[in-house]
Amino acid sequence: MRSLLAAALVLALSAVAGPAAPPAPPADPTTEAYDGPLPDRGAVVVHDAFGGVHRVTVEIADTPALRTRGLMWRTELPEGMGMLFIFPTEGVQSFWMRNTLIPLDMVFVDRRLRVVGVVQWAEPRTLTSRSVGKPSVYVLEVPGGWTARNGVRAGSTIELEGGLRARTGQP
């Protein structure tokens, strides 16, 4: 009897409260006010064409929202910092700079961790498609001019450090 009374009370209260509000639509990661999850951090070591080694601390863009957001609305990207985009499958990747306020270099990397191409000084605030036309599973964005200053080009290699290596399934 008590359980029947409790059930009736719950039904009566829910009828008074009205129907549940519909879930909020997902936030648009391209807007300046986006307050979705922040990317994790990791590190990448880039081996240049001349035997030099360059460590880059990266934010990890490994979900659709983080990949869409990228480095939009940033007013600076300090030397030694970048963003590593991780795609679920290898394919020809293409990027645009909508709402990106700073010039960037883009380093396209295949599943064997070999640089397959570089886009230098991508112009901010454009919808121009940027690609190297070769399959990649990672794209490293760094400050504009970084790849030229550090001798990074097709054929260079990268290493994923620590937890980033395990996270991506790299040995």
Image (tube, rainbow, N blue to C red):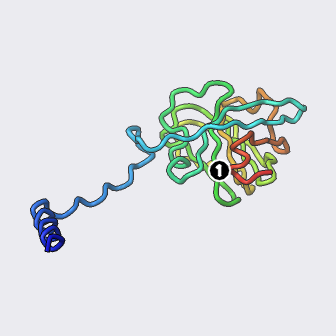
Q: Left or right: 15 with respect to 40?
A: left
Q: Furthest-front residue in view?
A: 1
- 12 vs 27, nearest the viewer: 12
Q: Position of residue 134 (x, y in %)?
A: 75, 55
Q: Furthest-right residue in view?
A: 51
**Amino acid carrying mark 1 in the image:** Ile
Disc 1 residue crowd, few under 14, some 14–19, many 20+, Cα 10 Å: many
- 6 vs 12, nearest the viewer: 6
Quarter-of-image position of residue 80:
top right
Q: Is residue 119 above or below residue 56?
A: below
Q: Is residue 63 above or below residue 48?
A: below
Numbered disc total: 1
Quarter-of-image position of residue 36:
top left
Residue under the image location 64 percent in, 54 percent down: 87
Name the image quarter holding the N terminus: bottom left
Residue under the image location 16 percent in, 65 percent down: 10
Residue under the image location 34 percent in, 56 percent down: 25
- Which residue matches tag 1? 86
Q: Position of residue 111 (x, y in %)?
A: 77, 54
* Secondary structure of residue under mark 1: strand
Quarter-of-image position of residue 43:
top right
Q: Position of residue 153 (x, y in %)?
A: 81, 39
Q: Position of residue 56 (x, y in %)?
A: 71, 32
- 85 vs 143, nearest the viewer: 85
Q: Left or right: 73 with respect to 155?
A: left
